[in-house]
Image (cartoon, grey):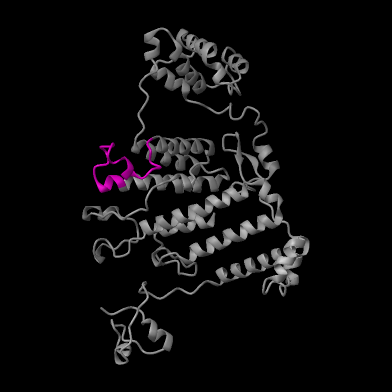
Amino acid sequence: MQKKISCKRCQYRKLKCSRTEPCESCSKVSTACEYREQDKKKRPVSSKYVSELEERIAYLEGLIIEIRDTVPEARSILSETSGFSEITVPPKIQSESSSVVISPQPDNLEPDPEGSLIYHGPTSIMHGKLRREERVAAHPDNSALGAKTGSNFEQVAQHFGISLDNDLVTIALMHFFKWQYPQFMFIYREAFLRDHFGDRQNCKYWSSGLVLSICALGLLMSPNDVQRRAIYGFARPSIATVQAFLCLAFYEIGRGNVSKGWGFSGIAFRMAQDLGFQRDPKKWASCDTSLATPEDIEIRRRIVWGCYTSDKLISLTLGRPVYFSHHDIEVEKLKRLPDFPELELWLPIGFDSQQGDFGETKPMVPCFQKQIELSKIIEQILATLSSQSAAQDGLAYRGHLDRLNLEFGRWETSLPQCAQWNKWETPSTLLIPSVASLQFVLCL
């Protein structure tokens, strides 16, 4: 079989290679013919990656000189080391390091579409969306934190026959505050009861959902068996429930309901952990009968890695801490599952069913694997930008940012051909959704 590249000897000596194994040139001189493991040409390193390396080298040299000039012990050690005594900092680097102070964008509170003040961290895309004067004019009173928002609780309660003035509600509240309140001090009893027994209008510390939640806890302490059974019947966690909550999270965030989307994503992530998805499914195969086939195992892996990447995307978008740490996930890498012929109409844009088994190049799984790698870098970025102590040390902070830029450069250089995108391509060029989603994260 003919190779795509020349052998090592022909490349080194710049000889014409027949690309056979062994090639004709090596056979004539009875020399071992060797090929690189990867039978393809290496992509040239981008100028952006080279410039980032140059900047990092210049920064590190400047840091070494600063240490040499300020720490006597370091000066003597560096003077004995070959090459360090001749290092000088370029004037440009000196002026930049002395005058430029790098600091993360401050966090703040922004009103959501319903008027509630919502936290946005340094990386949030909501920064600068509205000037403060416009925000105040649009939402002059945020003190109620969304209490004026309309609710359909009355219709739902009427449908299920729930009344907040029922004696059972009062009994449940009494049991809660008598027996369980010391463990739930995050609820301010006086303010809650004042609102509950008041007109229940524009309440900051009371809601119908909070009442029902407290009642569910309070009835656990009831000596009446009938009352205790009234709270049973909670839904069991499942794979489909995790997927549903995560879909709802993106839906609500896309509509601007940040708090609701953030809450739904938290439910999905915690439920996934509750089901043990953070450990590789093979670990549970002996005790979980639902893991009967390789497909079941691969689906579990896709869910946990999907939760991991979604967590980073949501946290980056809103500027908030991540929930899943990469160190907490002990799951193997993803594998490709076969596409069946009857799914032809359901395949994403960019697949050609005429190329055998729905295309020789399937970009979805490779792109998703690269998105997982990108999520690891995003996790480091969020940890760096949210650290106030790191931001106070300008040089160390610059070092962190340079290292992250290098990580980005390495990641971008390692993208497979099917995941690459050229911004200079014509508008008529088909952009595959899996590639577009990967580039979208980069734009954030």
Q: Is residue 136 left or right of residue 199?
A: right
Position in image of residue 335 (x %, y %): 32, 54
Position in image of residue 410 (x %, y %): 51, 64
Please name the residue shown 44% across and 53% down the image: 372
- Locate residue 279: give its quadrant: top left
144 vs 20: above or below: above
Please name the residue shown 59% across and 46% down the image: 126
Quadrant where the N terminus lies? bottom left
Q: Is residue 65 visible?
A: no
Residue furthest to the bottom in view is 28
Q: Is residue 93 left or right of residue 177?
A: right
Say which of 28 and 240 sits in front. 28
Position in image of residue 21 (x %, y %): 28, 81
Position in image of residue 367 (x %, y %): 40, 58
Q: Which residues are magenta?
A: 275-297
Quadrant where the C terminus lies? bottom right
Say which of 32 and 420 sits in front. 32
393 vs 362: above or below: above
Report the number of discs. 0
Q: Main secondary structure of the magenta part?
A: loop
Q: Is residue 363 visible?
A: yes
- Locate residue 142: give its quadrant: top right
Residue furthest to the left in view is 341
Residue 287 within the segment the image draws in magenta: yes
